[in-house]
Structure formats: C-alpha cells, structure tokens
C-alpha cells in the first residue's frame, strides 16, 4: 500500500507556523508522509491569514500552484480566513474542504474520502465556540521553534478581524508550556520564540476561566529556569502589557534575548483613539526608554499602520516624526485595508490608495535608515550568532541575540550552531559581516 503524501503552505504569522507544524504532526501520527509544497502530494493543506487584503488574494494563487503539481489532489483550507469567510474559500475552484478555528485541529477526522468534491465542503463553528485552548509548536520547519502560549484576543481594535477569526483570549497551562519548551530543547533546537495573538495577556483562560492564574512575567520567569534552552525570544507584545518588571527581568535573564517587537500602529494619539488602542504614544515612549536604559544594545521592532481612516497629512507626519526621533531599530509597515465587519471600514476620512502607497514607501525608507543606524551602532561589539539552515546564493545567514543579521560563506557545519563573533562591517546588501571571536566550535 502506497503511503499517502501531504504538503503544507502557511500564510501569515508565527502563530500560524506553530499550528501548521502541529497539524503536520497529526498527519504523521496517521501514517502520512510530509513532502514539500512544490512536490506531488495527495493532500495540500493551506493555512490562511486574513490580516491584510493581500493575504486573501494570495490564497487562489497557492491553490493553483497545488493543482499544477497534482490536479487530482485534495485541497484543504484552514486558518483565520477559513473561519471568517468559509463559503468564499469553498467556492474557489479546486478547494475540497474548509475547516474553521476549532475543526482544524481535528483535520484527519475529516479525511475518510479524498475524492475531489464538486463544491468545497465546510465545517466551521461559531467563533464563540472557540473557547478552549489547543497547544502548538513548530519543529523541523526552521532553525527557531515557535512556541504557542496563548490564543485569541479580547481587545476591540477597530481595524482588526482577529477576535472574529480566533475567539476570546485564552492561554495554555503553565506546566504544558514548560513541557513543550523542554521537548523542543531536547530535539536540539537552540532558540524558542514565544508566540500567540496577544501574548502579554498570558494567564487569562488558563484553566477555562477569565481570571489570570499566572501573568506573562510568571511565564517568562518559569521558562528562564528550563534546562537546555539556549535562547528565548519574545514575539510581538502590546506596549500596555509589556511591564517594566518584565523588561528588567529580561535584562538580567540567562536565556531571554534583548529583542522586543512592540506594535505602535500610529504616533498620533487621535488615531490611536480611533483605533481603540489601549495606550497613548507617551506610554510607548516610556517603554522604549526603559528597554534602552537597562539594555542599551536591545533591538526594538515596531508595527505601524498607514492610511487608516482619518490619517490626515498632519497626523501621518506626526507618526513619521515620532518614529524618526524614537530609539528603535526597524519597522514592520502595514498598509491599511478595509476588512468586513470592522468599525474602521465604516469610518469617514478614507485615505486614497495612492496616498496609502506613498506613505507606506516613506515609512519603509525610514525603516531602512533605522536598521542601518542600529547595525552601525553594533559594529565592533562581540555577540553570539545562531546560524540558519538555508544556503542563499552561497552564503549562510544568522542572527545575533539582538537580531542583527549576519552572513558568511556557506558552510553546512555551521547550521543550527551558536558561535561567538565580532561584528566588523556592513556589506552592500545591508547585512553585517563578522569575524569569529574564537575557533569555530559551537557553544
């Protein structure tokens, strides 16, 4: 009997990658062989995202890619877009099955018949039924592992569909997180990235209630004690939930690295109010100042949205100038796109697409300037690099603990190893070159 083959494609965030990896392991437990998405497979699973309009559009392209390789393959859609608009995905030519927020974790239960369907079959719960927690982590897909610690969100940001796609805020039990972290470490993975929808809200719903049994700081302190973990990295965390106590703990931690990614979205307090964010720019300034006070070499990344309704030229320049003056390291720039069933889609003061693109380009230019300045500030310093696993045009790349990207001639022996280095120069691609501080011996 031939072993059935399954392939996966993930759109979107680190959380999606952790869940794809967990879903893939459920297929392996059922005897399936995992192959690359570009290879012939019996089943193609696409984990969708709906944060931006572009992610929606890419879905059809990915389905066509799968059909080119095997037109008879069974195509399954899961993820946020599948929960928000299951019928829309089911109507896409070639899609056979669409699973919602809770059904995706029982995916193999729906595979009794892999015959192509005339119409996509939908199994999707009401989102208020997504009130239980399913753990996940990624292994084998990347050098770093993404460890899911939290899901869902209780915030009501006016532009965001995530609460509609993932449900209420809920957390993994602390003992489960520690067990998963130990399992990841035991497999030789050197770095774990904590991920979730709103990880600073960790502890809510840990035991099926709305109380916080533990805090995010409790989680960080407990993970710092797990044996065998070389590096822990905090992914995106809301500024109002990143407490000074957590920042101070990371500064003296043996495993947590000096790298933070903190969503801002706008430097205009008026726009932050329209977005229903839970802070003003003053609090954000204080968080950045505290990080730099206790970790001067820390890398700080920022999410920012351009073109939100009501973003006048004056308010955009307020954001630009605020970010220009702030001691940050890079930006993730998102061009606002209207999402169904969000208050922002009905707001006045719509910004034209032409202006949105212009402002996005300006902020991306600012990001490049900020990243270059941060890299230059790190030249001459000694750090530790973790090398990635991909050969990119004859080079191997890696990241220091404070997220400086470095490169060296390809050497497979360096993959997934840690080395002490000294940063020396920046090349024409904006990547840092280095020299080994000692012999090439992995830590």
Image (tube, rainbow, N blue to C red):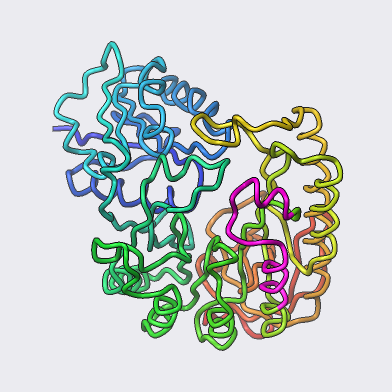
The one of 410 and 305 positioned closer to us in this rendering: 305
Q: Which residue lies furthest to the bottom in this view?
A: 252
Residue 146 horizontal/vertical position (percent): 44, 60
Q: In which quarter of the image is residue 298?
A: bottom right
Q: In which quarter of the image is residue 434?
A: bottom right
Residue extent of the magenta highlight: 269-289
Quadrant where the N terminus sits is: top left
Indicate yes or no whether the magenta region holds residue 1.
no
The one of 11 and 5 positioned closer to us in this rendering: 11
Q: Which residue is drawn at 58% across and 59% down?
A: 278
Residue 150 horizontal/vertical position (percent): 38, 60
Q: Main secondary structure of the magenta part?
A: helix
In the depicted structure, whether residue 186 falls above or below residue 281: below
84 sits to left or right of 370 = left
Residue 364 horizontal/vertical position (percent): 78, 47
The one of 125 and 107 positioned closer to us in this rendering: 125
In the depicted structure, whether residue 210 falls above or below residue 418: above
Q: Residue at x 72, y 55 (%)?
A: 269
Indicate yes or no whether the magenta region holds residue 270.
yes
Q: Report the number of discs.
A: 0
Residue 226 horizontal/vertical position (percent): 37, 82
Q: Residue at x 50, y 67 (%)?
A: 416
61 sits to left or right of 259 = left
151 sits to left or right of 65 = left
């Amino acid at each position: 009997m031939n072993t059935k083959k399954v392939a996966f494609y993930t759109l979107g965030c680190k959380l999606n990658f952790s869940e794809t990896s967990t879903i893939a392991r459920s297929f392996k437990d059922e005897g399936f062989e995992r192959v690359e998405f570009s290879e012939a497979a019996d089943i193609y699973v696409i984990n969708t995202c709906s944060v931006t309009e572009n992610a929606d559009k890419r879905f059809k392209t990915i389905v066509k890619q799968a059909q080119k390789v095997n037109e008879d393959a069974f195509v399954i859609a899961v993820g946020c877009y599948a929960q928000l608009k299951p019928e829309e995905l089911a109507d896409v030519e070639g899609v056979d099955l669409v699973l919602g927020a809770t059904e995706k974790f029982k995916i193999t239960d729906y595979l009794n018949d892999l015959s192509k369907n005339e119409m996509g079959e939908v199994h999707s719960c009401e989102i208020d039924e997504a009130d239980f927690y399913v753990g996940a982590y990624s292994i084998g897909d990347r050098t770093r592992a993404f460890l899911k610690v939290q899901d869902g969100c209780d915030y009501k940001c006016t532009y965001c569909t995530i609460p509609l796609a993932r449900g209420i805020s809920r957390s993994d039990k602390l003992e489960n997180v520690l067990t998963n972290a130990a399992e990841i470490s035991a497999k030789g993975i050197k770095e774990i990235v904590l991920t979730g929808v709103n990880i600073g809200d960790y502890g809510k719903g840990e035991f099926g209630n709305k109380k916080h049994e533990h805090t995010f700081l409790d989680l960080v302190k407990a993970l710092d004690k797990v044996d065998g973990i070389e590096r822990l990295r905090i992914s995106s965390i809301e500024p109002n939930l990143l407490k000074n106590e957590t920042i101070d703990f990371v500064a003296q931690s043996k495993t947590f690295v000096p790298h933070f990614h903190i969503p801002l979205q706008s430097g205009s307090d008026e726009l932050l109010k329209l977005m229903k964010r839970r802070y003003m720019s003053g609090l954000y300034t204080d968080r950045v100042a505290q990080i730099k006070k206790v970790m001067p070499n820390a890398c700080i990344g920022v999410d920012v949205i351009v073109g939100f309704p009501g973003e006048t030229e004056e308010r955009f320049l307020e954001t630009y100038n605020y970010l220009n003056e702030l001691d940050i390291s890079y930006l993730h720039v998102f061009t606002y796109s209207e999402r169904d069933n969000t208050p922002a889609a009905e707001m006045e003061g719509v910004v034209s697409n032409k202006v949105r693109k212009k402002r996005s380009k300006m902020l991306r230019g600012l990001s490049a300037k900020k990243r270059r300045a941060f890299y230059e500030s790190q030249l001459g310093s000694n750090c530790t690099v973790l090398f990635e696993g991909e050969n990119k045009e004859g080079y191997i790349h890696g990241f220091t603990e404070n997220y400086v990207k470095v490169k060296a001639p390809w050497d497979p022996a360096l993959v997934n190893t840690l080395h002490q280095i000294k940063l020396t120069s920046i090349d024409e691609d904006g990547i840092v070159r280095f020299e080994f501080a000692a012999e090439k011996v992995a830590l």
